Amino acid sequence: MPTITVEQDRYGNVEIEPVNTRLRKRAVAHLAGFGVAPGERDSLIYLQGDAGEEFLADIPASAAREVREGWKVRVRVSSELFEALVGYDAAF
C-alpha cells in the first residue's frame, strides 16, 4: 500500500504524489513511454473536477476534509488505486 501526499490547488484540482521517490521514478519512467511524463516540479497525478471529488471520496473522510481546507495530507491507498491513477498497465 503506497503512501501518497494529497493536496488541492486554488482551483480545486487535486494533486497527488507518492512519498517514496523510487515509486515516483518508476511511474515517471512508465509514463515517459507514452510521452506524457511529468516534469520534476509537476505533480505525478493531477485530477480535475469530478475526478478529484471521486478520489477524495475514496480516502478517509477526515483526510478529505483536511485536503478541502487547504492542507497537504499523507494517506495510504491500495496498490490497485495507485496503479489506476498512474495507468492500468503500470506494474509496480
Image (spheres, helix red, strand yellow):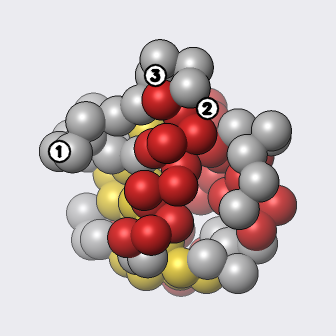
Asked which secondary structure carries label 3, the reply is loop
Measuring from the top left, give residue 92's x and y in whole percent: 71, 62
Neighbor class of circle 1 (other Cα within 10 Å; few <14, some 14-19, many 20+) is: few
Q: Nearer the viewer, residue 61 or 17?
A: 17
Residue 41 seen in the current view: yes
Q: Amino acid at mark 1?
A: Arg
**Residue 10 vertical position relative to residue 50 in the rendered view, above or below:** below
Q: Amino acid at mark 3?
A: Val
Return the mark for residue 91. Answer: none
Q: Nearer the viewer, mark 3 or mark 2?
A: 3
Left or right: 10, with 55 as reference point: left
Q: Nearer the viewer, residue 1 or 51?
A: 1
Asked which secondary structure carries label 2, the reply is helix
**Residue 90 vertical position relative to residue 66 in the rendered view, above or below:** above
Judging by the rendered image, the residue that carries numbered circle 3 is: 36
For image coordinates 61% across by 77% down, the residue present is: 2
Q: Amino acid at mark 2?
A: Asp
Return the mark for residue 41. Answer: 1
For image coordinates 70% across by 38% down, the residue present is: 87
Measuring from the top left, give residue 1's x and y in whole percent: 70, 81
Judging by the rendered image, the residue that carries numbered circle 2 is: 50
Residue 48 seen in the current view: no
